[in-house]
Amino acid sequence: MSKFSKGKKGKVPVASTAALPDIVFMLLFFFMVTTVFKEKESKKVKINKVSVAITENLQKNVLAAYYWIGRVPGKLDSEGNETYNIQLDDDIISESDISKYLNNLHQESKYKGKWYTDFYNVFKIDAEAKMRLIKKVQDQLKEAEAFKVLYSVDKK
Amino acid sequence: MAKREIEEINAGSTADIAFLLVIFFLITTTMIKPQIAEERLSQKSDVEFLLKQENVLSILANKEDSIYIQGGGVTYLDKAVELEEIKKAVIYFYEHDYIKDPNNNYIFPNGEIVANPHDQSKELPFPDYINVTLTNCNDTIEKLEEKLKLIEQLKENHPEYESKEKFVLELVTWNKNLDAVKVIGEFKMLPINATVTILTDNETKYETYMQVLDYIMQGLNELRNKLSKDKFGKSYDKLNDDPKDENNEIDKIHAIQQVYPKRIMKQKQVSY
């Protein structure tokens, strides 16, 4: 020790960077653990998507309301047919409440001035669903003046 | 025994390795883009333009999910058709050049001859296409602007005078035509009020509806691709649509879309 301290008296010791890898690894693990890919999937209704030939890529993150129209496993109506439920964003909703929901969205500051140009309604609908239900839902959209509709599909 | 010191491993570069890993994952992670098909719901103002029958190509899907086609130069109303026929019907509806021979057959520029499948003796009611050239673009825009001014003046005294909405819409279309003509030259376009409509029964499956929509888009895409290859030497979906790229070809895309516009409407009532 005495050998060392002799010539280097008065000098500031070099800061040790040995801990740097640990810090970076901590950062890496933190992001690895916390990153959850934003996955718009419904847990409440079951959907078989339709596949078509011509599709477009969803360009950017758009302002949107997400709809799922699908079967509820095991739930039958009085005539023994499978029932279809509509999930709007996070909740199961009855079709008559949709325009109310959209009108509330319209009031939010986030959507002000963008409603007619940038607001989309993204539908994910079960292949077997009947057009009656879809027409009812879209009538509600028209009432709330939300005219842009996207259908989520698989590419053939 | 002599004490042997274990040499310390230099860990200075682990930080670099970790950074490299972080950056590698940052760059290579691409999430799968969701695939979508787009549609615009019809507004009230759309409906009043539907005047002439020949300007409407109706595709009907009934509750048994069979397809019927009516109008637009094709009439298969008497029998259900394959989905593939929709594509053909859309192409005929949009296709701009055809000559009629004495037997009422229609000859398309690619040499294909089409007879009226419904009734050989009858003419196919195609919509009247509008010729778009640089001069008539400018003329029409001038006329429309005058007309709008006139309405504006008349409105001061007669508030009930005809609404200018329709002319504003036409002016917008013709301005777009002007842009398109500058990019691709003369073309023929569908009348402004011409449209493809999809009629579905309440019991029609969603899947059928999507298939109809898809086949309409396939027909449209085929036309767009052909035009794009003729004019720009590459297919329509290869055109660069990145707005941040300086060499983007968005004006070309808009021009093609103006020649073959996507006009699809959904009708509510089933009237057959």
Image (cartoon, rainbow, N blue to C red):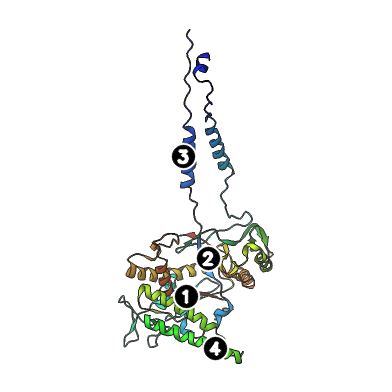
Q: Nearer the viewer, mark 1 or mark 4?
A: 4
What number is the disc on residue B151? Answer: 4
Report which quarter residue B163 is drawn in: bottom right
Given the image, on which type of amino acid does mark 3 rest?
A: Leu
Given the image, on which type of amino acid does mark 2 rest?
A: Glu
Q: Position of residue B213 (x, y in %)?
A: 49, 69
Q: Are marks 4 and 3 on the same chain?
A: yes
Which circle's residue, 2 or 3, is located before the other in the chain?
3
**Is residue B133 at all visible to an observer of this figure?**
no
Q: Where is mark 2, residue-wise? A: B207
Given the image, on which type of amino acid does mark 1 rest?
A: Ala
Q: Where is mark 3, residue-wise? A: B20
Q: CA distance from mark 2 to mark 3?
A: 47 Å
Q: Position of residue B65 (x, y in %)?
A: 52, 70
Q: Secondary structure at mark 1?
A: loop
| Classed neighbour count for the residue bearing mark 2: other residues with Cα under 10 Å, few (<14), some (14–19), many (≥20) | many
Residue appearing at x 53%, y 59% in the figure:
A49
Q: Where is mark 1, residue-wise? A: B80
What number is the disc on residue A29? Answer: none
Q: Secondary structure at mark 4?
A: helix
Report which quarter residue B155 is drawn in: bottom right
